[in-house]
Amino acid sequence: MKICSKLSALGAVLVLSTAFASADTVVIASNFQTQFTGYNANPANSTPTNNPPTFTNNISAGTAWTHELPNSNWISWDPSSGPTGGQTAGSCLPPGPCSTFDANGSYTYVFTFTTNGSQEYGGTIGVMADDTTNVILNGTTVLLPEGVIGGDAHCADGQPNCITPVFINLGSFDAGFNNNGVNTLTFVVQQTGSTYQGLDFAGTLTGTPEPRTLLLMGTGLLGSAGAMFRRMRATV
């Protein structure tokens, strides 16, 4: 009996150790892997009307935007976009290259990440944009911009803007979240000031084994210990 108890205790420790050791971490961050998928002349329209997907460029926050979030970069389809000067009056459309300010409209950026189906995910991402942006997860909107676009000298009055990041919870609890495979985050950056536009986002999602998986493992452990105990009694 003592042997079975020890084996059961050891098995339980192994189950917990495996659970913690196999926890998955998904890093979400604006960088060169984020794709620009298109532009629409209507700032409120999230459907891009042109441009094949292209990878983005890192741009500088200058002194007007808040410094980028940890482990991320301010990005744009336009390598000259950003409040650092060097562009003249006028408006430039994708695909560029540009020597003038970016035109009014909506600019769509896409970031994908992959999850492991045996785990449940949860975490927080921070978002900034000029002028502002919404956030769409697998076709379901999880964040809408607030405030008047272009109400101040640089970006929107409400969050998310280029000054103060907004933080949103993201994970398996979202209706549109794909717990087993590829997830797509879409950011539609709205621009009305016909000057600079850009996007910055960063965060992590941590996966933990689903409770039913641990329950099955625990049940199997108890069953094995019980079978061993019955065999031991039969030999006595």
Image (cartoon, grey):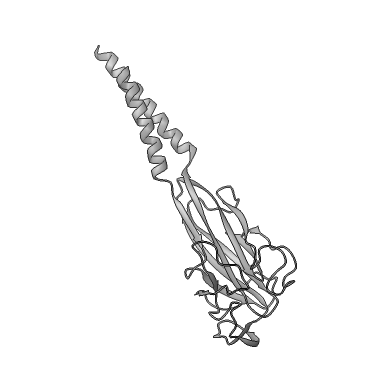
Residue 65 in percent (x, y) is at 61, 70
Residue 163 in percent (x, y) is at 64, 66
Q: Is residue 205 above or below residue 42?
A: above
Residue 120 in percent (x, y) is at 50, 46
Residue sitting at x 65%, y 81%: 103
Q: Is residue 16 above or below residue 224?
A: below
* Left or right position of 100 against 13: right
Q: Answer whether residue 139 is visible to the viewer in this image.
A: no
Q: Answer whether residue 75 is visible to the viewer in this image.
A: yes
Instruction: State which quadrant residue 39 falls in.
Output: bottom right
Residue sitting at x 44%, y 49%: 24
Q: Which of 15 and 37 lies nearest the eye of the viewer?
A: 15
Instruction: State which quadrant residue 194 falls in.
Output: bottom right
Q: Which of 232 and 24 lies nearest the eye of the viewer?
A: 24
For this orientation, the residue located farthest to the front is 63
Residue sitting at x 55%, y 76%: 77
Q: Which of 234 and 72 lies nearest the eye of the viewer?
A: 72
* Left or right position of 134 against 6: right
Image quarter where the C terminus lies is: top left
Image quarter where the N terminus lies is: top left
For this orientation, the residue located farthest to the top is 236
Q: Which of 107 and 100 lies nearest the eye of the viewer?
A: 100
